[in-house]
Structure formats: C-alpha cells, structure tokens
C-alpha cells in the first residue's frame, strides 16, 4: 500500500472511531508497527491528528480530510458518478464546477469532449484544464482553502454574480432531506450558494457515503437543487426521502 493510501485509511479510521491503536492499524494496513508510528507522527506534524502513547486521537470534531487524502476514497464510485454526470451536459454548454474529488473526475471527462466553457473556483481543476485549448476556462478568484484547493469568499461570490452557467455542479460533504446540503467550511458554503444562484440547472455530485451525513455549514435546502447524482450504495429509503424533496435522483 502506498504511503498516501495508508494516510487516507488512517485518517478515515480516526475520523470514524475517534482514536486509533498502532497494533490494530498495523494489522489493518498490513505493515509494521514502526511504519504506522512514522505515519502517525507525520500526520501529527501536519495537524491532522494528535499522536498519543500507543496510537493517536482525532485532531478535530468532524475531521475534514484534505483533498490529497480524499482522492483515493470511493474512487470507482466517483468515476461512475462523473461519467453519468457528463452525460447530462449538452454540447457547447457553460458548466460551473466547485472543487472536490468527484467534480475533478467530471472535469477530466468534459475536457476530453471539449467545445464548452467551464467556470470553476478549484485551482486543481483549473490547472488541468488550462492546457486544454478546446475548453474555454474561467477561474473564479478568492481566498485559497488548502483543504479543498478552492478559492472562496466575498471576491469569489461577487465574480460569480457576473456570470450565468447552464449547469452548476457542486460537491458536498453531507446531504440529508432534513438539513439539505452541507460542507465543512462556512465560506465555502457561501461560494457554493453563489454557484447555485448562477446556474439554470443545479446538480449535486455526492457518493453514497455523503448521504445521511450532516456537516458544519449549511449550503442550501434540497429544494434549491434540481438533481442528485450518486452511486448504487444509496438505499431505497434515502432515495425516496431525497426525491420527496423534489430532487431527481440518478444512481451510477
């Protein structure tokens, strides 16, 4: 297992359980205790968890994993979601993309098609698309968030108010029928709302692990969303609850 993959597994485990034990992690990851201790120390030095004697504990409530540690999670599901979402985009469309691992997968597929305009606040997406002359790229400026590689805040919101997109795709950290769409950061939530306001059609991309979760900052109620693209891990009860809010659900 690659070091980055181990880090993602460790962070996921500590976020879910609240604490980790070196010996249990060594067995889970199939590596030595010494390797686990080095990984835990590096994650501690990055401020992502707190090292303890014999293990580690979570460094924050409802830990937000940096994008570099999320890219390998639910990867196949995210690719399926992105492929289905790309099929919803007509030729020559103007597409809005917030940051996130699933929207990044969508950006790559749309770049292969070309012939469209992409408006994004994600610097990693912009870096991939800027070398694609067949895609017209508009980058929204703002305050940089290192966790998500997004540019957010009042400057981003003002710039978005000057544009109109045919479809706004947003990623979320949580989605429920009661609390709507949520994310970890309030400034990011505000910029996500600006993307939604700019779009004729609004579509949320979220793998099924995000459904039923509520995170810190509210983006919008589900009534502000037209469609949800998720994977087949969504339960029938969850699909009904979302559909009852007027949202069309696509399962990839």
Image (cartoon, rainbow, N blue to C red):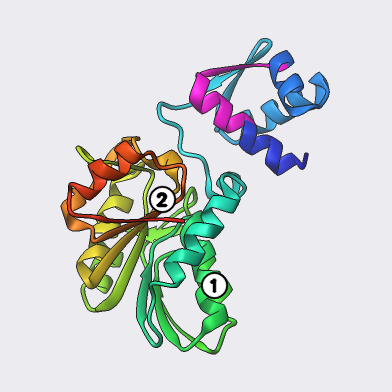
Query: Left of 186 or right of it: where is 25?
Result: right
Q: Quadrant of residue 112?
A: bottom right
Q: Label 2, on which residue?
A: 206
Mark 1 neighbour density, 10 Å: few (under 14) some (14–19) many (20 or more): some
Q: Quadrant of residue 4?
A: top right
Say which element carries label 2: loop
x and y percent of residue 133 in the render? 55, 89
Query: Left of 117 or right of it: where is 124?
Result: right
Relative depth, front residue between 167 and 66:
167
Query: Left of 251 or right of it: where is 178?
Result: left
Q: Label 1, on which residue?
A: 109
Mark 2 neighbour density, 10 Å: few (under 14) some (14–19) many (20 or more): many
Q: Is residue 149 visible in this depiction of the protein? A: no
Residue located 46% across and 50% down the image: 231
Specify the segment rendered in magenta.
10-22
Residue located 38% across and 38% down the image: 235
Q: Is residue 239 visible in this depiction of the protein? A: yes
Q: Quadrant of residue 55?
A: top right
Residue located 26% across and 43% down the image: 240
Rendered view: 38 above or below 204: above
x and y percent of residue 125 in the render? 51, 68
Relative depth, front residue between 223 and 101:
223
Q: Distance between the residues labelled 2 and 1?
A: 17 Å
């Amino acid at each position: 297992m690659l070091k980055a993959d181990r880090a993602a597994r460790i962070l996921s485990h500590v976020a879910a359980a609240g604490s980790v034990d070196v010996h249990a992690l060594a067995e889970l990851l199939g590596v030595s205790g010494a390797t686990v201790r080095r990984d835990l120390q590096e994650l501690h030095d990055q401020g992502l968890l707190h090292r303890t004697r014999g293990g580690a504990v979570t460094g924050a409530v409802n830990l937000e994993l940096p994008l570099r540690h999320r890219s390998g999670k639910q990867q196949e599901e995210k690719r399926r979601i992105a492929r289905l979402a790309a099929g919803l985009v007509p030729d020559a469309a103007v597409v809005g993309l917030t940051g996130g691992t699933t929207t990044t997968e969508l950006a790559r597929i749309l770049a292969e098609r070309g012939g469209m305009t992409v408006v994004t606040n994600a610097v990693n997406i912009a870096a991939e698309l800027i070398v694609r002359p067949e895609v017209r790229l508009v980058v929204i400026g703002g305050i940089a968030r290192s966790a998500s590689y997004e540019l957010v805040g009042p400057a981003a919101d003002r710039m978005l108010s000057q544009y109109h997109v045919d479809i706004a795709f947003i990623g979320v950290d949580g989605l429920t029928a009661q609390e709507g769409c949520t994310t970890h950061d309030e400034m990011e939530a505000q910029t996500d709302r600006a993307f939604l306001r700019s779009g004729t059609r609004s579509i949320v991309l979220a793998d099924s692990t995000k459904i039923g979760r509520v995170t810190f900052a509210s983006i919008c109620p589900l009534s502000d969303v037209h469609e949800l693209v998720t994977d087949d891990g969504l339960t029938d009860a969850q699909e009904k609850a979302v559909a009852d809010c007027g949202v069309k659900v696509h399962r990839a």
